[in-house]
Amino acid sequence: PQAVSPFILLIFLSSFLFVPFWLKVSYRFGKHKTLCFSAMLGAFAAGSAIFIPENGMLIGAVVYFFIGINNGGSGAMMRSVMADVVDEDTLLTGNDRGALFFSMLTMTNKLGLALAVGITYPILSWIGFDAKGINDQDTLDGVRWVMAATPCLVNICIVAVMWNFPIDEQRQRATASALNDKQAA
């Protein structure tokens, strides 16, 4: 319990400190591929949580550090990709619906957080976890698997959806040029 606050701080610090790194990666590989790389790191980091030994504070800190690095990359890249989607939609419809798109992004983030609680708590109950009681080793191992597998699977889904995302740098440049031409006219 005494490690919760330092680990959360570690996640936030590594998220913040690695945003410039992810930006540099995106300049080389593109935004959607960088989002996928970040999600791959997130899947690896989350999956590694299963191997944190009891009282393994140092290993736990390393895992949470990499979870934070993923959070910085996925957060920055998801919003950047959304900006490209807004430009594409503006070009296609003639309407700037950026606020709508970003509110949808915020809503899906909050929906994901709600689902995390709404799905995880019943699973923890199903495996017999008692937050106020003493849990046997099988139950604690089940908690580890839930904690590791859920974000690992979500990150794999992000990679599956985003790997072939159609708005790459070349298409975004063409869209931005077309929007500038429309505004000039």
Image: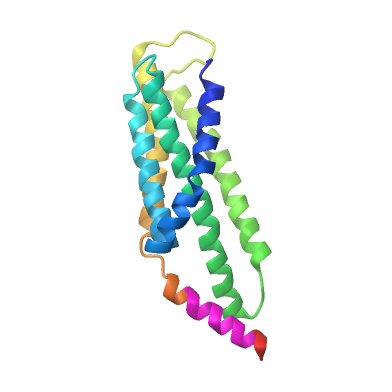
The reply, left or right, for residue 49 in relation to residue 180 is left
Residue located 43% across and 63% down the image: 27
**Quarter occupied by the C terminus:** bottom right
Q: In x, y percent, where is residue 101?
A: 61, 62
Which residue extends farthest bottom?
185
Main secondary structure of the magenta stretch = helix
* Residue 36 seen in render: yes
Color theme of the render: rainbow
Whether 180 is among the magenta residues is: yes
Q: Quadrant of residue 94?
A: bottom right
On screen, residue 185 versus residue 3, left or right, reads: right
Kindly tell me whether residue 146 is visible in this rendering.
Answer: no
Q: Does 179 lie within the magenta span?
A: yes
Q: Residue furthest left?
A: 51
Residue at x 38% of width, y 62% of height: 28
As displayed, is residue 133 above or below residue 168? above
Residue projecting furthest to the top: 134
Most foreground residue, 27 or 92: 27
The number of discs equals: 0
Which quadrant holds residue 103? bottom right
Chain part drawn in magenta: 172-182
Percent across and percent down for residue 52 are: 35, 23
Residue 43: quarter of image: top left
Q: Residue at 49% across / 38% down in the picture?
A: 14
Observer-nearest of 173 and 48: 173
Q: Where's residue 56, x and y in %?
A: 37, 18
The percent coordinates of residue 7 (x first, y second) are: 50, 26
Q: Residue at x 57, y 65 (%)?
A: 83
